[in-house]
Image (cartoon, coloured by chain):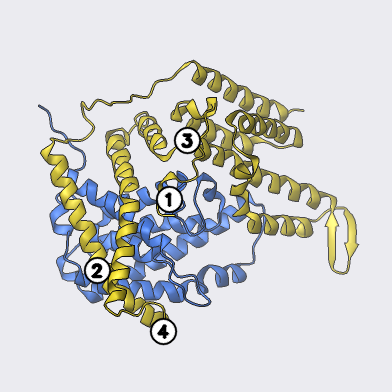
Chain colours: A blue, B yellow
Amino acid sequence: MKTSKSINTKAMIYCAIFAALISVGALTRIPVPMIPFTLQFLFTNLAGIMLGPVYGAISVSIYVALGLMGLPVFASGGGLGYVFQPTFGYLLAFILGAFVAGKMTQKEGFRNFKGYLLASFTGLLIVYILGFIYYNLLAVFVLNINVDPGLLFLHAFLMPLPGDVVSCILGSMLAVRIPSIRRQISFNF
Amino acid sequence: MLKDVTIGQYYPTNSIIHRLDPRTKIHFTLLYIVALFLVDNMIGYGVAFATLITITLISKIPVNYVLRGVKGLVFIIMITVAINLFMTPGTVRYQFWIFKITEEGLKVAVFMALRLIFLVTGTSLMTLTTSPISLTDGIEYSLKGVPGVRKYAHELAMMMTIALRFIPTLMEETDRIMKAQKARGADLDSGNLIQRAKSLIPILVPLFVSAFRRADELAIAMEARCYRGGENRTRLHALKFGRIDIYAYATTFLMIGAVILTRWI
């Protein structure tokens, strides 16, 4: 009997459960005045930190795929049409953000509060940069408009920034407290 | 609300479109997006519009459901129209104060707005007529045709299915943990951003621990039943292309052909 599994069962299930957790987190809206605060970034970031780069990225990709399939797990609904929302770039960037955050905490020495915090902020930076690029590409090629970069900067960076910074700190605190599952599942990656 | 999440946008009716193979619908949607970007005049949009109306009527989905997808994009459509309307240089049609509407601007604005609306309504037709589970099946079969990802097609689809199954469970779990912590006196609804974030820790730690416990249990259960990935695995409901799928493909290619032809009209 040939057993050539490409991904081991346990890692696969952890990825799936984490995708479900991200969906639940994105649906949980914390009522804070002025700024939109969901647990979306917190959970995608934790996926990278807890599952490692490859599995974390897979897990976030599955979350994005579920949203595109019509599940209302994104910030404002879901469905394939979400690709044409300017904020879809952030969702794609979460995948790379999780990968990088996972990669940065690969070494045991970086698995402490400081290391997690550094990885989270790097992930956040990547999310913002890629989200900004997608916003611009969509504006130029699909909508045929030239947006004022300053206005876009304000809308795309400063509005969600406080919530995301809090998410980073909270994520690092959680990553320290929750027992590591990474050693159990990461044989290959 | 808890139960609705995993149904997504699916609107069940007993129509031919609903019975189509999910692969057919996925391929149609991809080709439809490509076709829309090839359109360069109003006649092309006429073809797309006719296709959309026909599909909507056959699928027996209420029109307001199909248009619901546009609602989320109203803001971005308005911005697109406004900017294109006022910023495009050309022959001036109307002028008041500092705003001037040019003929070219009018054309571009209508064109872009229609493209967005058609893109969103067309793609939402797929998610309206296909349940997430059969879409997952369709994705699995479709990925098997892509070199490189072929090896992981089954695993990816399986992960999506597991995630679908666990979303309601984990939502219930979150709700239960929140209530349990509130019963112990946790204050979740007051304070500033940092205080609220701190009050999330006693909710998230048990949530993660219980989610991981469930994952472990599922892994043991699956391995005890000798689950070993997609290789040599058979299915209870294998996807099969039927006669209606052939008609659907023919119609799709007809539409694409018509759209491409309109470029020379």
The span from disc 2 to disc 1 (Cα, nearest Å) is: 24 Å
Binning the other alpha carbons within 10 Å of mark 1 as few (below 14), some (14 to 19) or many (20 upward) gives: some
Instruction: Look at 70% across and 44% down and name the residue there.
Output: B114
The span from disc 1 to disc 4 (Cα, nearest Å) is: 30 Å
Instruction: Please state, as top left, top right, bottom left or bottom right, where the N terminus of chain B lies in the image.
Output: bottom left
User: Do marks 4 and 3 share a chain?
Assistant: yes
Q: What's the amino acid at mark 1? A: Val
Instruction: Look at 20% across and 49% down and name the residue there.
Output: A11
Q: Pointer 3: what residue?
A: B130
* Mark 1 element type: helix
Q: Earlier in the sequence, mark 2 or mark 3?
A: 3
The image quadrant that residue A111 belongs to is bottom left
* Mark 3 element type: loop
Binning the other alpha carbons within 10 Å of mark 4 as few (below 14), some (14 to 19) or many (20 upward) gives: few
Instruction: Look at 42% across and 60% down and name the residue there.
Output: A27
The span from disc 4 to disc 2 (Cα, nearest Å) is: 21 Å
Picture coordinates of residue B97, whole percent (x, y): 88, 69
Q: Pointer 4: what residue?
A: B191
* Mark 2 element type: helix
Instruction: Please state, as top left, top right, bottom left or bottom right, where the C terminus of chain B lies in the image.
Output: top right
Q: Pointer 1: what residue?
A: B5
Q: Earlier in the sequence, mark 4 or mark 2?
A: 4
The image quadrant that residue A113 belongs to is bottom left
Label number found at residue B205: 2
Q: What's the amino acid at mark 3? A: Thr
Picture coordinates of residue A51, whole percent (x, y): 23, 57
Q: Which of marks 1 and 4 is nearer the N terminus?
A: 1
- Disc 1 chain ID: B
Numbered disc in front, either 1 or 3: 1
